[in-house]
């Protein structure tokens, strides 16, 4: 509660929601990748789910979860960076696109 109060005092109400927009985009991207991979792969690999090996289906589900997390990781990195600058006097990033650009310029895209 103390952290929230300090952030509210230094940044105002918007400081509590810094990184919220990219968080929503990241969730949509993650879930889209997950369901796209899972549903497509399920239809291709497991035509009759009731007759398939439980462990093969479990391994496939874990693989799709991991891949969706990897695909959405860059968005999560931007979200964390934006959230971590709440309460700072000097902001490193002006917004989401500025954060993407500075990360790409300073640290590379790969």
Image (tube, rainbow, N blue to C red):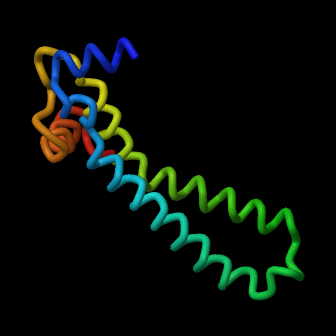
Q: Is residue 51 above or below residue 104?
A: below
The quarter of the rendered structure image containing the C terminus is: top left
Left or right of 91, for residue 16: right
Q: Is residue 106 left or right of residue 50?
A: left
Asked if 104 appears above or below 70 in the picture, the reply is above
To which quarter of the image does residue 67 belong? bottom right
Question: 53 or 108, which is in the foreground?
Answer: 53
**Could you say which is closer to the camera, residue 107 or residue 32?**
32
The residue at the point 69 percent across, 62 percent down is 61
Q: Residue placed at 14% from the left, 40% from the top?
A: 95
Task: Find residue 87 and report its horizontal and vertical position in percent.
Answer: 22, 18
Q: Quadrant of residue 63?
A: bottom right
Residue at 42% x, 54% y is 27
Q: Quadrant of the N terminus?
A: top left
Q: Is residue 4 left or right of residue 18?
A: right
- The spot of residue 43 in percent (x, y) is 66, 84
Residue 75 lies left or right of residue 68; in this view the side is: left
Q: Residue at (60%, 77%) from the top-left corner?
A: 39
**Residue 40: x and y, percent?**
58, 79
Where residue 62 appears, as percent x and y from the top left, is: 68, 56
In the image, residue 45 sits, relative to residue 94, either above or below, namely below
């Amino acid at each position: 509660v103390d952290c929230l109060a300090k952030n509210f005092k230094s940044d105002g109400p918007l400081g509590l929601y810094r990184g919220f927009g990219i968080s929503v985009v990241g969730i949509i991207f993650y879930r889209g990748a997950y369901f796209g991979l899972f549903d497509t792969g399920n239809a291709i690999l497991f035509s009759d789910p009731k007759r398939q090996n439980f462990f093969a289906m479990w391994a496939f589900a874990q693989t799709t979860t991991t891949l969706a997390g990897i695909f959405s990781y860059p968005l999560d990195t931007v979200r964390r960076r934006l959230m971590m600058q709440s309460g700072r006097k000097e902001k490193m990033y002006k917004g989401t696109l500025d954060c993407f650009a500075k990360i790409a310029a300073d640290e590379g895209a790969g």
